[in-house]
Each structure stands twice: as C-alpha cells, then as structure tokens.
Amino acid sequence: MTPPVLPILVPDAQGLSKAAAILRRGGLVAFPTETVYGLGADARNDRAVAGIFAAKGRPSFNPLIVHVTDLAMAQTIADFDDRALLLAQAFWPGPLTLVLPLHPDAGISPLVTAGLPSVALRVPAHPVAQSLLGAFGGPLAAPSANPSGRISPTTAAHVVAGLTGRIDAVIDGGPCAVGVESTIVGLGPEATLLRAGGIPTDMIEALLGKPLTRNTDPASPMAPGQLESHYAPQGTLRLNAKAAMADEVLLGFGPVADGLNLSPTGDLTEAAANLFRHLHTLDAMGAARIAVAPVPEYGLGQAINDRLRRAAAPRPSAPPD
Ligand code: TXA
Ligand code: MG
C-alpha cells in the first residue's frame, strides 16, 4: 500500500482557488499565518469544524479562533465596543485575537465557540492567509496545524510531518515570521489577558490606558484549553444511559428510538458536529433531566465524552445575582 501523501499547494491564483474549493466543500486546508500555520475549516460548517478536532486528535473541544479578512467581516460576527475598535484598528491585521460577544445569528458553528456566547476573532497579516480568506470569502476556524499535544508548526514541512493522511492540503507560504501564537485578549467587563503571544502585552495596555486583568487563580489556569467557561446545559445529565426514564429526555447516539440523536448511524464526526447544537436545543426545550446514550471512547468520542463528563459533573451552586 502506498503511504498517504499530503498535497502541497503553491500560493498562486490556481493553488488558492483549489484551497478555497476544498474549504467550500467542508475540507481541511493548512495555511501560513504570520504566527504559526493554521488548520483551516469553514467556521460555519459543523462537520468541517468537527474534522479539525478529529485531525488534531484533540481530547477535548477547546473553542477555536475565527480568522476573517478585515474588521468589517469581524463586525458581522461579533459586537465591537470602543475598546475592541481601538485594539482592532491598532493591531489588525496582526497577531492579536479578541474574544467578543458573538452575534447569535452569525452562523458560526457552536463547535467553534464550544457553545459559548463569545467568539475569538483575528485578522491575520500574512499575505497568503489574506489571499486565502479573500478567495474563500468567509470566516475560517483555524487552530495551529499540529497534532494535539505537539509543537506548533512554523513551516509547511512541519505540517506535512504531523498531519499527512489527516487533512486535505497545505499551502506552502514559507516559514512564519512571528512563530508564536497570537496574543488573546478577552473583552468582558474587564479587558483580560487570556494568552500571551505575538503582540506584547504592554503595547496593548498602553493603548487601553490600564493594565490587563490577569488570571492568577491556579485552579483556573488561563492556558489555552484550560478555560472553565465551557457551555453546560441547564438540565442534569445522566451518562451511558441505555434508555430514558419517564422524566428524562434522551440524547441518543447510534440506532436508538427517535428523539434528539448525536448521530443515528453512530458516526463520531457527525456526533461532534451536533453536540453543542443539541445541548442548546435541549435547553430551549427546557429539558431538566437528560439521559445520554453511551458514546465510544475512541477518536472524537474522547472529546465528546470529555465534554459530556464536564457537563454532567456536579456544579457549584449559582453565584449570587
Ligand atoms: O496565532 C494564532 O492565534 C493561531 C494561528 C493559526 O492564527 N491560532 C490559534 O488558534 O492559536 P487556536 O484555535 O488554537 O486558539 C484557541 C484558543 C483557545 O484555547 C482559547 O484560549 C481561546 O483561543 N479562545 C477561543 N475562543 C474563545 C472564547 N470564546 N472565549 C475565551 N477564549 C477563547
Ligand atoms: Mg495550538
């Protein structure tokens, strides 16, 4: 059997239109940014985004950064207050990511935001990333293009070494200039440093005129993926349920009786794509007790189960209003 080969695209008009076509049909394309190579997928396509987690072998669903062409596209996806506008105008395009209130009707897959009401946005400066976004014409979810737990890639060769056989193509734009991921700033009531990165923090603080809040609580580290604020439904979850009891709503997997189903055919990529959407639907239904069918603990099943276990874990009592 011949080993798999990862197609390497040249960033000319033909290569870029090929890449855009792959993305349009829900495929995965790695592309250079000024920070690191990103693994891009259509941020509006649940299955494509689930494919990112599958390709990276991520054991949990961390929210992903959405890459856009410019501030105008970003404003169709999230709310920009004065601070956000100031930072975007100063540092975009460039290695700054802003976490902002998501427009619920922006069409962003809930898998991108891990079901959160906020979204991380960035306008990359790399000319190839810009051209790709232009050719694709929509938002691209893109974490670093490496297998989970491995070092971030700063050349196309790194991507080939890590992800051959798992993604559809890589665009070779040469080595990345910045080499570390973007700085992430959350703009809630306070401006908070969520990840140090390509833009020095003091430049951001100088512009805002005050220090960024830093998370100093060791129990909730600010490192990527350690965020505690993942979405959990209002109802309680009972996992590995063979069937629903009289007062429960069933969240199925595989061929079970009708109702909400993560994947009637038992497809883990489809299940991942549906997970957050279905949890939201259960909330909208007012489901107080949810029985969840067993999901196998391999491939994307690990990420799904990680998410379900967190959602099922006993919760701290609600904070006072
Ligand atoms: O430089 C970069 O930012 C690279 C290149 C490819 O652009 N991208 C990157 O993306 O590092 P990603 O998806 O791996 O970054 C995800 C991190 C999460 O782990 C989390 O820290 C933060 O971004 N994040 C994303 N959405 C968030 C949200 N709604 N709230 C808080 N943090 C969020
Ligand atoms: Mg990464």
Image (spheres, helix red, strand yellow):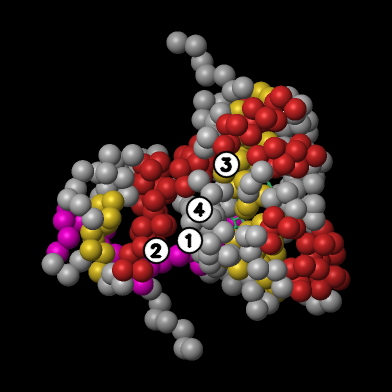
At 50% from the left and 53% from the top, the residue drawn is 109
Quadrant of the image occupied by residue 266 = top left
**Residue annotated with mark 2:** 280
Give the residue type that dot 2 points to. Answer: His
Q: Residues within 10 Å of mark 2 (few under 14, many from 20)?
A: some
Of the numbered discs 3 and 4, the one sitting upstream in the chain is: 3
Circle 1/circle 3 CB separation < 8 Å: no
Whole-angstrom CA distance, mark 1 to mark 4, is: 8 Å
Circle 1/circle 2 CB separation < 8 Å: yes
Q: Where residue 43 sits: x, y (%)?
A: 56, 48
Whole-angstrom CA distance, mark 3 to mark 4, is: 11 Å
Q: Is mark 4 on a helix, strand or loop?
A: loop
**Residue annotated with mark 3:** 41
Q: Is residue 17 above or below residue 261?
A: above
Of the numbered discs 1 and 2, the one sitting upstream in the chain is: 1
User: Which secondary structure dominates the residues rendered in magenta?
Assistant: loop
Quick check: which quadrant has ligand 1?
bottom right
Of the numbered discs 4 and 2, the one sitting upstream in the chain is: 4
Question: Which of the two residues, 90 or 297, is positioned nearer the viewer here?
Answer: 90
